[in-house]
Amino acid sequence: MSVTILVGAQFGDEGKGKIVDYLSDQMDMVVRFQGGDNAGHTVVNDSGSFKLHLIPCGIFKKGCKAFAGTGMVINPDELIKELDELESKGVDTSELYISERAIILMPYHIALDSASESSGRTGIGTTKRGIGYAYADKARRNALRFENLKDREYRLKRIEAVMPTVNAELAAKGCKTFSVEEIAAKTDEWAKKLGGRIVEPVSFINKAIDRGERILFEGQLGAMKDIDLGIYPYVTSSNPVAAYAAVSAGFPVTKIDEIVGVMKAFTSAVGDGPFPTEMNDEMSDGFRGTGNRIDDEFGARTGRARRLGWPDLVIVKFAAVINGFTSIAVCKIDKLDTYEKIKVCVGYKLNGKPIDYMPSATDLYKVEPVYEEIDGWMSDTTGIRSYEKLPENARKYIELIEKHTGVRVKYIGVGPAHDEIIVR
Ligand code: GDP
Ligand code: IMO
Ligand code: MG
């Protein structure tokens, strides 16, 4: 198990942080391979409770390198803040490295994202962290990368080259513009604070693979928010699918050994867009909690109440198909402990007819979920650590997931903390 990729199988917030933290015990390196600080990955372990946004969740394991990879868009101010927070809680961050090819997410990306979101016409419910605008600048070759922090003279030329375009857009949206000096001063500060962590990523990762190191690639968000394959336009601006780990890091897909898909035992989503199994408010309040517990259903990044719904195996199956899962981790099975009946979506109908594919957003709004109602188990699973000891109806639910996805469920989360897990 040299190269393992872990990704979200739904709309994000499936419990990736918890599973990465668990698996990192067996890893030499954990790489975040896409996204930015739109992520909120919750980890509860011996070091405390954390919601990580940019730093890979392997940071807690001694001797495990944490790598912020090329596919990311990184706001250096947020990264410095997160490093300070971890260090203040006694976490050693000396093994955090940054790809020189990763994109620098600038203050103006955040301003543009916020302005777009405030406009009723263009808003899709983003996290307002500047993600879409940073990736847009990357695609049109108007971005700066971490490599630019290594050479001040060249960096100033780049800033001078990109700012006229950026400022014209800021002005058109009624936002404050930025001077070249302002941005240059920011980059000087980032170079000082982060310069020592920047590495050439392709050899860094390929040499580690060749040495037989165990590497875990940590995805952000989930399959349904993939820019190409998800519910466009209510998606993020990168590819949270397994193949992108290889594409962005620069190693061959043939070197991937394991692909773990993480799903929540029910479904949640943050932001706008179609959600076939969404529950009404009254029902979802039961799942959501009040916000006092670490595992209550509020966005780990924005604090927004998550939209909640019944489990949807059409989505998980789709995620399995596009990613090639070799195993599935089901988190939060314990949150179904008190339900007498559980409605599991096992198919969709469109215009009254069953369909055997995942439609795009236009049609996904119109589908009618086909449910199989199963009996709940009505008992506490939080203390259980072996599959055989799970109540029979909980095992039947796990086996239903396996039947519909064709993938073995290897990990089952029964609580938010590191050891609250069943491994089969
Ligand atoms: P991520 O973005 O995929 O890392 O997931 P988040 O951290 O945003 O959201 C997952 C939430 O579920 C967090 O509040 C976790 O503490 C919690 N969680 C993860 N696994 C389990 C589990 O097995 N049981 C319970 N009760 N909570 C869990
Ligand atoms: P993790 O990694 C849940 C959602 C936003 C919005 C869409 C685009 O913790 O699972 P963006 O800010 O990326 O331009 O927003 O994606 N979104 C998330 N939803 N969990 C996340 O991250 C998310 N990151 C972005 O709500 O619908
Ligand atoms: Mg999250």
Image (cartoon, rainbow, N blue to C red):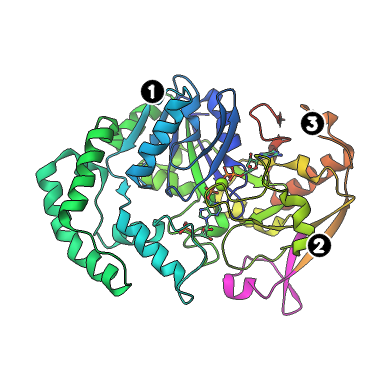
Q: Quadrant of the C terminus?
A: top right
Which quarter of the picture shows residue 223?
bottom right
Residue at 84% x, 44% y is 396
Label 2, label 3: how many angstroms apart (C-alpha)? 25 Å
The residue lying at 71 percent from left, 42 percent from top is 332
Bin the neighbour count of mark 2 within 10 Å (Cα to Cα): few under 14, some 14-19, many 20 and up: some
Amino acid beneath label 3:
Tyr
Relative side of 337 to 29, left or right:
right
Mark 1: secondary structure: loop
Q: Left of 376 or right of it: where is 118?
A: left
Q: Identify residue for label 1.
A: 211
Q: Look at the picture and state if 157 lies above or below 48.
A: below
Furthest-left residue in view? Answer: 153
- Crowdedness of circle 3 by 10 Å Cα count: few (<14), some, many (20+)? some
Q: In the rendered structure, which amino acid carries the disc numbered 2?
A: Tyr
Side (left or right) of 203 relative to 353: left
In magenta segment, residue 161:
no
What x and y, as percent, mark residue 372? 84, 59
Q: Depth-wise, is mark 3 or mark 1 nearer the camera?
A: 3
Q: Amino acid at mark 1?
A: Arg
Task: Give the residue pinned by disc 2.
Answer: 371
**Residue positioned 48% across, 70% down in the render:** 123
Which stretch appears magenta? Answer: 345-368
What is the spatial separation of the Cα atoms under label 2 and label 1, in whole angstroms?
A: 48 Å
Furthest residue toward top: 63
| Percent coordinates x, y for residue 354 in the rendering | 74, 71
* Residue drawn at 18 percent across, 65 percent down: 164
Task: Judge whether residue 68 can be spotted in this image.
Answer: no
Q: Ligand 1 within 8 A of label 3's CB?
A: no
Q: Which residue is disc 3 drawn over?
A: 387
